[in-house]
Amino acid sequence: MENSIISVLNVHKSYRLGKLDVPVLRGIDLEVGEGEFLAVMGPSGSGKSTLMNLLGCLDRPTKGSVLFRGSDINTLSDGELAKLRGLEIGFVFQTFNLIPRLNAFENVKLPSYANSKPGVNPDKRAKELLKTVGLEDRMRHRPNELSGGQSQRVAIARALMNDPALLLADEPTGNLDSKTSLEIMELFSKLNRQGRTIIMITHDPDVAEYAKRVVYVKDGLIQEERASGLQEEESAAKAAEK
């Protein structure tokens, strides 16, 4: 695939359990293009969380290669890998992972302390991002003063602080009600339409439909891959216009 941001090439991943090597991924091949919105689904124990850790450069494969914009993560030092994560990958988690003692503005600004790109004013960037997610009037509120949906919006803004190449979301609607889940997924869709590359792990088929492509992981392998229903509708509409 041209303009791939991540390439996973014949990746195996095993974990040591006592004297045994327990295989989790058994030969995964996957390409994610710039500007894509990919959903990864699979049952518990399928290997999707392990795959997410590799896509997020949080772990290294036992065998095979993970290339981030052409660079094999196995060739990078721990420090180089940490810098890559800090500057190029934004993480959004099911449990938000906000710092309780910090307000929304301070939480969003947090990634800039460890890593920042030249010419960026962190205060200005944090305020702009809170406005983008509709929380400019909540920037001085702490997490215990925010709803679940507002907390997740702060987490999304924080993930975007360093303008990463990739946004990685792990069950981003798992702790939210259906109405709030819809609002959060509309926000992800908006970010993708603006050109943001997004990979999302989810167990919810309705949430997965917001992605442009869906892959199913089972027993450490990709068992199925398809365009989402939303993507199929958009393709059909474009074809009808021609």
Image (cartoon, rainbow, N blue to C red):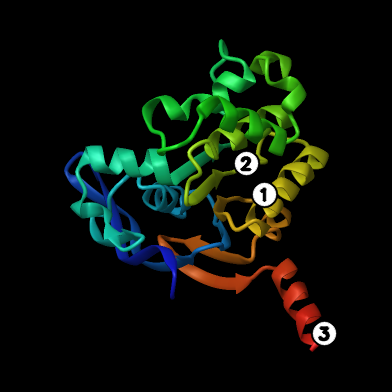
Q: Amino acid at mark 2?
A: Pro
Q: Amino acid at mark 3?
A: Glu
Q: Residue at x 67, y 31 (%)?
A: 130
N-term mark: 3 or 1: 1
Relative to 5, does residue 79 appear above or below in the rendering?
above
Of badges 3 and 1, the one in the foreground is 3
Using the image as rendered, state which of residue 32 and residue 128 is in the foreground. Answer: 128
Of badges 2 and 3, the one in the foreground is 3
N-term mark: 2 or 1: 2
Relative to 225, does residue 35 appear above or below in the rendering?
above
Question: In what element is the residue under mark 3?
Answer: helix
Pointer 1 residue? 188
Pointer 3 residue? 241
The picture places residue 74, in percent across and down from the top left corner, at: 22, 53
Total count of labels: 3
Farthest residue toward the left? 19
Relative to 22, does residue 154 appear above or below in the rendering?
above
Question: In what element is the residue under mark 2?
Answer: loop
Q: Amino acid at mark 1?
A: Phe
Relative to 29, does residue 176 appear above or below in the rendering?
above
Using the image as rendered, state which of residue 223 and residue 115 is in the foreground. Answer: 115
Q: Residue at x 72, y 75 (%)?
A: 232
The picture places residue 53, in percent across and down from the top left corner, at: 40, 46
Pointer 2 residue? 172
The picture places residue 191, in percent across and down from the top left corner, at: 65, 51
Residue contact at pointers 2 and 1, CB within 8 angstroms:
yes
Q: Residues within 10 Å of mark 1 (few under 14, many from 20)?
A: many
The picture places residue 210, in percent across and down from the top left corner, at: 70, 58
Q: Residues within 10 Å of mark 3 (few under 14, many from 20)?
A: few
